[in-house]
Amino acid sequence: MSQSSKNCWELPKDEICDMAFIVSACCECPSYSSESPLGLSERRLEPRPGVRKILIADDEFLIRWSFSHQLNDAGFQVTTAETASEAIDYLSKSYFDYVLLDYKLPDKTGFDVFDSVQDSTKRGRFLLMTAYGSESTRQGAKERGMHYLPKPVSVEYLTEVFS
């Protein structure tokens, strides 16, 4: 049976869909669609009441994958983006309680993503992580009100911050 012809109750509990965000699929899943490569439509799941929404933007697949799995298991609703443009698109459509941005993304910087969100009432708390830290990057994060995190960042620390 191909992945796209599976019924939603046959999907693993935590499945990465074609939009690279984590969902918990069940037979009542409102986003199930046999037209999507992994059996999920492109419509987002509504957040569970009281669940914090997190956007992770990083060009490193393993960082997105490991953080999203572990944070999802900790009870957060996680969406991931590989580029700044993807992150900006998600932020234009939805509110996130926390936004974890890599500084160096393929198309823009994490600062560009932050600066693109003009309406401060739509801004959640932004965290900037980077393996290429400098005093000017740290200062730029501070001026924007972003929390600065040098890589590597532990998921245990993020879970504590997001809780």
Image: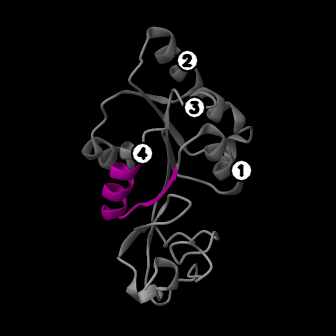
Indicate the position of residue 145 as horizontal and vertical percent values: 54, 28
Q: Which residues are magenta?
A: 64-80
Q: Is residue 66 highlighted in magenta? A: yes
| Distance (Cα) linking label 2 and label 1 | 23 Å
Q: Residue at 57% of width from left, 30% of height from top?
A: 110
Do tag 2 and tag 4 residues touch (Cβ < 8 Å)?
no
Comparing 132 with 125, the one in front is: 132
Do tag 2 and tag 3 residues touch (Cβ < 8 Å)?
no
Comparing 81 with 141, the one in front is: 81
Q: Which mark is residue 92?
A: 1
Point out the tag, 2 or 3, that comes first from the N-terminus. 3
Q: Secondary structure at mark 4?
A: helix
Do tag 4 and tag 1 residues touch (Cβ < 8 Å)?
no
Point out the tag, 1 or 3, that comes first from the N-terminus. 1
Which residue carries the number 3 mark? 106
The amino acid pointed to by label 1 is Ser
The amino acid pointed to by label 4 is Phe
Decide: few, some or many residues near mark 2? Use Cα within 10 Å; few <14, some 14-19, many ≥20: some
Point out the tag, 4 or 1, that comes first from the N-terminus. 4
The amino acid pointed to by label 3 is Pro
Of discs 2 and 3, which sits in the foreground?
3
Which residue carries the number 4 mark? 61
Q: Residue at 54% of width from left, 63% of height from top?
A: 18
Q: Which mark is residue 140?
A: 2
